[in-house]
Amino acid sequence: MLNSRKKKDLILQSITYFASFISLFVLISILLFVFLNGFKLLNMDLITHNFESTSYIADLKDFTGPGDFTIDKDFNDNTYYSSKWGIALTDDENLMGHTIVLVTYVHPESPFKDLRNKGVATQDLSLGIDYEIIRIAFNDGPSALSIQGAQNMIHVLDTKTTFRELEYSTSGGGIRGSIITTLYLIGLTLLIALPIGVGAALYLNEYAPKNRFTKALRNLIETLTGVPSIIYGLMGLALFVPITISLTKATGANLISGALTLAVILMPVIIRTTEESLKVVPDDYRQASLALGGNKTQTTFKIVLPSAFSGILTATLLAIGRIIGESAALVFAVGTAIKDDVSIFDKSTSLSVHIWAMMTDEPANIELSTTIAIIILVIVLSMNLSIKLISKRLLRKYGVTHE
Amino acid sequence: MQSKIQLNQTQKRHNQWLDNTIKYLLMGFAILSSSFIFIIAGVIMVKGVTPFITNNGGLGRVNLADFLTGTTWLIGESFNSNLYAIGFLIISTLFIAFLSLLISFPVGVLTALFIAKIAPKKLAETLRTVVEMLASIPSIIYGLFGAGIILKIVYDLSTLIGFQSKGGNSILSSVLVLAIMTIPTIASISEVAIRSVDKSIEHGSLALGASKTQTHFKVVLTSAKSGIFTSAILGIGRVLGEATAVSLVAGGRRSGINFNILDTTSTLTTMMLEGMKETTGLDYDIRFSVGIVLMVVILITNFTLNYIKRKVGNVDVK
């Protein structure tokens, strides 16, 4: 072989190496970025907490004076306990990265369990674990502030016999509402999209005659896949939102309209995936069922459909992945309001839109966004891997080997 | 005997009735799912045409020609005007799509070639999984990655050459985010095309004395070019339609055509996402008009690319 050609070949080959390692590099840097930034916020509190924190100013109700709440319990090094008031405080950082004083323990008989909302409403309050104390103000002397740390607060508290008011807030910054919204969306969307999609696939594969009408149906469904999701969002906004408003008690964009929009987005995916697995069901099965006297309906639903189970499962997993990842359509069809009390008749936001909402806010909250991204990535990637496993198993079942 | 036959007949009739009902029910599902393309088109048309034919609550009709060619977007209700123009958005959308394809197309196709033909089996399997994983990452995470990493890099880069960029929000950032989003799309579809190239064509080339690499580049790639073109069409469709990821890195430009890749930009989709507070009025309706334009842009681009694909010609690969 000529030397110059060898050189040329080598250069060409190495650019293919280079190009493919760009993909690898991109994947690794995305994963690194997401995990390095988001990992420190990832804990159970994040998942169980509300996003909005509520602040209260409270004072003591039926106050009898501090008592003796000595307990036999060990705390961490940076946790301080006041046996006079029965409360343990610690220094911490909240999900936004600010230093706070966190309540880690309240004695059951502590006066802090018996508080009253100081202000217009007479509302009973009670200090609980994980609440943030902002300040404690006294009649005599300066207030104890959270920026001075937990040790100082406990120290000041121990020298006093009463306080004028206590400002605290419930823990916020969590994503409980968005998780619930996402789960609702998954459930509702599958409830709508699966029957219609699987039904359409059954018709196209089992019943439809080979004519131009069937071909047109297939083409139209195929065309849907090329429509960008923001256009689906517009459709949801203009069609499904008014429909749900007139039929339910919803007053604006809501979870049902979002689920309907997602169902339309997922329809072509579900139909195609189900059809793929219907196609590999051997014809012998159908003929055997018909020969044994089963009618067409029995054959379809009792023989063919169960054989296509793995395809439907794949479609479901694909759909769940898409629902979790979808953002543009949901911005229109469900809205971007981050909610803690989720109702299916109200605006809300899924995990992906939560990221978008926080990133378009000023200032952008990259830390919490990447934490949510970890959750999304783990779910989506594990679904993807299970789809791979399922389809491999399906192919083996019918004796179709790869390639 | 008589009754048995009769029973059989009623059973048969019942079966037939059931079969037909189920058939028409399923057919209804199929028709419903395929009719959504018309429903989408209809709904968006009706809404999107409103700003051009009604008075828009005293603001006056939006002029269609100005809308399509102008270079300023004012938030109409707050400026109390009907001045919405998206000419500059159309141009910047196409510009960004073209640039990102310029990066993702060669990288994607070469990756596909590498996975399908050049790489050792183990490595190919790994890279295929990598591409699949990349394809399944939701676009919002690409946007987040762009906002967290690419913006910083672009910002530092522009400071290095003495350009004050708006925190890195720029055409370049949008292009990079979109490019890495489309690489997996292009790679996976091109790979299928490359694999389906007839082995005999390859063997012919090798028999004529061409080296393996020469065969891959000159014969395999040209034979698969129809499929590779399809991947580019799908890739550009994804680029044009992507909304949330770009909106995090584009910067939100409201007027003027801009070709400086370090300066801010907007696309049709990011403008649609902006300021979603309104629920009625011109500000709301105009999003549908932008939607129509977006669909038309995508259709025209697809049509043009398909035309080029036919012109470029087909090597027969089944």
Image (cartoon, grey):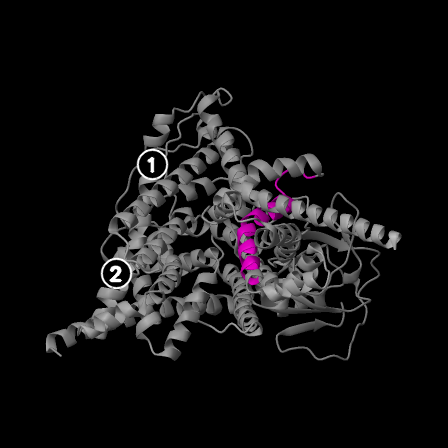
Picture quadrant where residue A73 is located: bottom right
Describe the element under mark 2 as helix, strand or loop: helix
| Marks 1 and 2 share the same chain | yes
Estimate how packed mark 1 is, as few (under 14), some (14 to 19) or many (20 or more) residues with alpha carbons within 10 Å.
some
Residue sitting at x 50%, y 43%:
A212
Label drawn at residue B255: 1
Residue B201 position within the rendered picture, expressed as x and y whole percent measured from the top left: 27, 67
Image quadrant occupied by the C terminus of chain A? bottom left
Q: Does the magenta-highlighted stretch encompass residue A213?
A: no
Principal SS element in the magenta part?
A: helix
Task: Residue under label 2, please give it.
Answer: B222
Q: Is residue A57 above or below residue B296?
A: below
The dot on residue A350 is none
Please determine whether, in this image, residue B111 is positioned above or below residue A357. Answer: below
Establish if A89 lies above or below A355: below
Q: Give the crowd class for mark 2: few <14, some 14-19, many >=20 residues within 10 Å.
A: some
Find the magenta span and give its range. A250-277
**Residue B27: x %, y % from top left:** 62, 46
Which chain letter goes with mark 2?
B
- Across and down, in percent, residue A378 comes to 54, 67
Q: Is residue A213 visible?
A: yes
Amino acid bearing label 2: Thr
Viewer-nearest residue: B292 or A363: B292
Mark toward the start of the polypeptide (1 vs 2): 2
Quadrant of res B186: bottom left
Q: Amino acid at mark 1?
A: Ser
